[in-house]
Image (cartoon, rainbow, N blue to C red):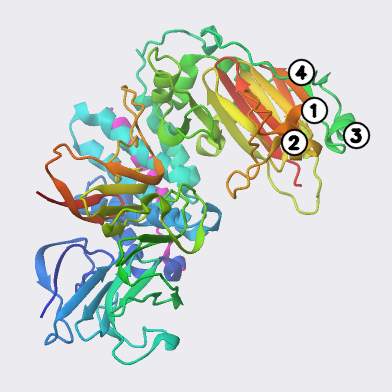
Amino acid sequence: MKDKLEAIIENIAPSVRNDFLSHKDEIGDDILFALNSSFTSAAKGNQYSKDALEFINSVIDRVWEQLNVGNWKDVPECLRDVFAYASFLKAMILLKFTLQDDEQNLRQNLIDTLEAIDRGLLLGSSNRQELCQLASALCPFICDASQKFPCENFSQLELSKRPSITVPHLKPLPSKECPSIESFLVDHFKPRRPVKLTGCIKHWPALTKWDNVRYIYEKIGPRLVPVEIGSSYTSSNWSQKLMTVDAFIKNFFFSETEERIGYLAQHQLFNQIPELLDDICEPDYCVLSENYDDPVGTDVNAWFGPSNTVSPLHYDPKHNFLAQVVGKKRVFLIDPKWSENVYPYDDFLLFNTAQVDLENIDYEKFPKFENTEIFECILEAGEMLYIPPKWWHHIRAQSVSFSVSFWWGNC
Amino acid sequence: MDAVCYGFKLFGQIGSDEFDTVLSQFKSYGLAESTKSIRSIAFGWSRCYIIFEDGSCWKYTLNKEWVKLDNLIPADMKKTNLHIIDLETSDYLHLAVTNEGHLFDFLLHFSAPFPAKVKKASCGYEHYLCLLENGSVFVWGSGSRGQLGNGSLNAVEQPELLVPLDGLIVVDIDAGGWHSAAVTINGDLYTWGWNNFGQLGLHSEEKITDESDDSCITVSSEPQPISYFDDSHVFKQVACGVNHTLVLMGE
């Protein structure tokens, strides 16, 4: 085992570069000094240094606090660079510790190392390739091949037992089988009209692979991901925390005592674990744009959870494809022309969220909602929903569900 | 009078000839005005301030020098006998209190009127707390993690009365990075804000275990009363770090 680890370290060590001198003014002498002090022990030889670990932990603590001050979007890029780089150094130092520590602590030491890597990937921006490479090299050491699961496929788990909710004035959303890009442009993209698309993602390897519990466990089980806990993000008991995919599945899919809902929602899982991209494919329609002069990339997010996860009525600013990979979801859609009827929150965080709860409509409080037209769509595995910008949508999973969303179109 | 220091010092906050992480023994600062009495000391990640009894303020910098800070008091407030008695810093925000109970930000030169004299001020990384001599608490700044305690996550630009504690006589306050705490005259403790490391004294869920617990809390945007195992003890004082809180208990 240890000789395999040694090979991994040797392989990755040359990519530990020390190139932060160019950011000297933004970072500060102290952080730079600490980075330099731990660089040598991270990059050279197999010797573990306790001092180096202490230095690098100081940098990580300090920069973590700096990253948390102010709005995330205003955080200077170079701080995110330092955080990722420091996480990479820490991972290398921890690997050297693992080599000299008892064999029986090996798995736990690697779990700690992977946690440092994933924290670097979640908040940092530099050295992503190296961090990803190291993470996927360590995963097989951590996964337990003899691990038993209550079922082979997620789709074998019981469907939701909750009574389905009743909403008035429902209209079924139209469905089309794999339209041409031209007809999608004319009929849906330009007029911003939602539609369910069938037959567009049937070639994705994910459709069969991601339903398999062991595949998910071995591919991403030990990885640290953000999980939302609580019935929905507008409820008072809502919180968000980091945990491994393995713990997430155990606690929220297979546990018979857990009553809360956990949801791996709106997470750029594919930036953290790029090998999952081999299983999916960006829809061809995403070449369409409202502004070809200034191209911007597509944001790909993962949405993975048990039955009954809820995204309450809200809208997003971009064109959106919601591709259903495992299980099914019930989606309600409302045209932005009815925005006034859904009573958006008057709040800088929740301005794109409606106060009207579609699952429990309070007509006394929200009388204007009465005659609002609502489209309904049951999205099954292998189907893809087009949600135009600003269209209000409410989504409830009716089974274990894994969806991928694509935000695109540059509007 | 001299000041001594120990602890974590990588960022130059307690001075050394060489960079290092921890100073495990008390060490003298070597003050420039060692004949004077020290009134107050304020620390951040990478700096240290000392106020002497005569109101003069000195800052210890990364260059291992003491620098005297003149003209901290805004021009429109200047008058004779007015001097600074307390500084509070969190690296990002800075407050000073004068002997007449004024409060101002000594870097932004922001000041605000209060209905009574200021008794104590404290700054978090993004929010301010201020205790008046009449026992009321004022808050302003960012509320992103509930640290204002006013039930909202929105920012507040001007100091506002902390309504949930209105009517209680508060005797001590302190702000951590993103959390806050207050002690009342009856010896009760209230905490609010970010609880990601359990710093509110409430159960946190930073690490999930197999046992589920419904009482976990990540953010509290309203003051939570904190009980201690033994009711015969009361809270006297409170101090907040970024990820932890310390209390002084009394009988």
Over which residues does the magenta segment extend?
Answer: A1-22
Q: What kind of residue is marked 4?
A: Gly
Name the residue at the bottom extreme: B80
Task: Give the Cα distance between marks 3 and 1.
Answer: 29 Å
Circle 4 Cα neighbour tier, 10 Å, few/some/many (<14 / 14–19 / ≥20) = few
- The disc, 4 or 2, on the residue closer to the chain's N-terminal end is 4
Q: What kind of residue is marked 1?
A: Asn
Q: Secondary structure at mark 1?
A: helix
In depth, the one of B56 and B181 nearer the eye is B181
Picture coordinates of residue B86, whole percent (x, y): 27, 74
Type of secondary structure dominating the magenta stretch: helix
Q: Give the residue number, with chain letter if any, for mark 2.
A: A341
Q: What kind of residue is marked 3?
A: Val
In depth, the one of B187 and B64 nearer the eye is B187
* Tags 4 and 2 on a common chain: yes
- Specify the subunit that label 4 lies on: A
Apparent side of residue B115 relative to residue A371 in the rendered image (left or right): left
Apparent side of residue A84 relative to residue A328 in the rendered image (left or right): left
* Residue A187: in magenta span: no
